[in-house]
Image (cartoon, grey):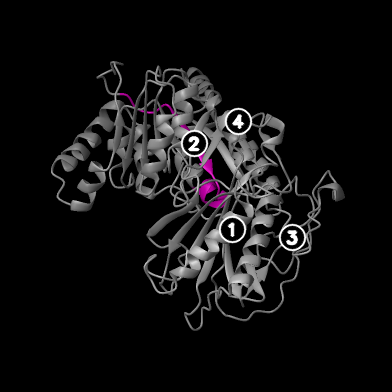
Amino acid sequence: MATPSTLVTARLTAVVPRRAPPRVATPTPPVEPYKNNLNCSLNCSHFQSCSGCSHELNLDRPHVLQDVKKFFEENGVKNFSFHSGKLWEWRCRAKLAVRGTPNEPLVGLYQEGTHNVVDIPLCKAHHPRINAAVDLLKQGIAELNIRPYDEDSGFGELRYVQMAVTTYNTSLPLAERYLQGKVQVSLVWNSRDERSPNSGKLFELSNFLWKNAGPGSSMHLIHSVWANFQTTSTNVIFGHKWRHLEGEREFWEHLGGIDASIDPSSFGQANTQAFNSLLRKLQNYVPKGSSVLDLYSGAGVIGLSVAATRKCRSVKCVEINKESKASFEKSLSRLPKTLECAISWHNTDASLEPLHWLEGSDVVIVDPPRKGLHPSLVDALQKVSLSNKKVATKLESSITRAKNEKRPWILRAREASVQVETGTNLDTDQIWPSTLIYISYGWDSFKEDCRNLVGKNGWHLEKAHAFNFFPGTQSIEVLAIFKRGPSVSLKKKKKKTKKNHS
């Protein structure tokens, strides 16, 4: 997984000016050869006022899909596939602003182009358990006279809430686990910590949620309650301090064949079912026994899933967000003890010394933020496509720089790594990636990265799949498989040309 990428439907838009004209729905362009499918319409009462969804028809075919299919066809990809998945009630993780008054709290997203929060109690994208938890939260705000945050004055107690649904419950039949999910509630409180004067109301609100929807209540809805403390006047949602208040501390999901732990401070995919489908597809492109590098790895769900399912020789996960370390360690503890794989997690910025990380890997998996790959990583992947001799020369200078490193923040990052060694003997010969697996949320940035990678025939596109992670938006998740060197057809063409000349 990657450094936390911004999700369009959960984005809390923070754009000025503070007042903007009412949003007008964009007409849906015709999608040939199909007609508008009314059976796949959003039918949400909040559409147009809420900034979450941008179109309400053809949820099973986002408008950008035409451009995606055309691009891959032009780049020689055959058998491109698109997985539509769940169209409603798919969102299992939502960050929502809390505004209004104690008697009339507003819990939702900012209206497009403003800081005005739109209440979305009947959101069609949310897992129904999220809507139920939001309704209970509003009851608690009103009953306990909790003051929602006011951006102009800086006063108020509750600023945001994150709702995350876990469907991991082995005591239920598989078919019932999704609908019976439990909600982890994270309350973003406007104070420095739990010792602040207004923290009494925080504990009262936590107790209210747990008493009315914990395991001892008539409806077991709440998985756990957490507090995050944030006092800055910026648009950053979370502060650095967290406290567990009620319920289970561990939050688990079963993804890609492994049990994955996701702390409230770590990045987690909103559409867990679509993400699981992507992981299963991705695993098909990792040869068994490979040495894998997982960049922008987050809590390491992708890397650990291929380690477990593909019997990898080694897996290195590289992530800049140190908060993901705890989740990685918990997930690692659930892997089979018989797994013969050297697994490590490194808290550092891979863009600083990309060749250092690429060495020794057969497969590289990247899941970058919306802006795409860092230019230094693109440059390193281009160099990898050169001869081993040229790459080795570049690498030697990189390793020399690493040995002579004086920057303390880089040294600290290296120290904050997690490594699990096995008895497996790794080859000492230099190995460079022959497969690049690219997971993209930013379609425009992916196209640019793709053109840079294939431009000099260093890499070529072999397979591509798309997933409907965010129905109702213009976004699409792409899984693209690159192979090192020119495509087979290009090699044959060059060989034929050479024969003609002779």
Q: Residue at x 19, y 41 (%)?
A: 402
* Circle count: 4
Q: Amino acid at mark 2?
A: Ala
Give the percent coordinates (x, y) of residue 289.
42, 18
Per the model, the C-alpha gap separating discs 1 and 2 is 26 Å
Q: Amino acid at mark 1?
A: Leu
Left or right: 52, with 269 as reference point: right
Which numbered circle lies on residue 420?
none
Among numbered discs 4 and 2, the one appearing first in the sequence: 4
Give the percent coordinates (x, y) of residue 77.
61, 32
Assess whether mark 3 and mark 2 are in contact (beta carbons under 8 angstroms).
Answer: no
Q: Nearer the viewer, residue 502 or 170?
A: 170
Among numbered discs 1 and 4, the one appearing first in the sequence: 4
Give the percent coordinates (x, y) of residue 155.
48, 80
Per the model, the C-alpha gap separating discs 4 and 2 is 14 Å
Which numbered circle lies on residue 170?
4
Which numbered circle lies on residue 260?
2
Q: Secondary structure at mark 4?
A: loop
Question: How busy is the neighbourhood of tag 1: few (under 14 within 10 Å), some, or many (20 plus)?
Answer: many
- Name the residue beneath numbered marker 3: 122
Q: Secondary structure at mark 2?
A: strand
Q: Residue at x 57, y 80 (%)?
A: 17
- Name the residue beneath numbered marker 1: 209
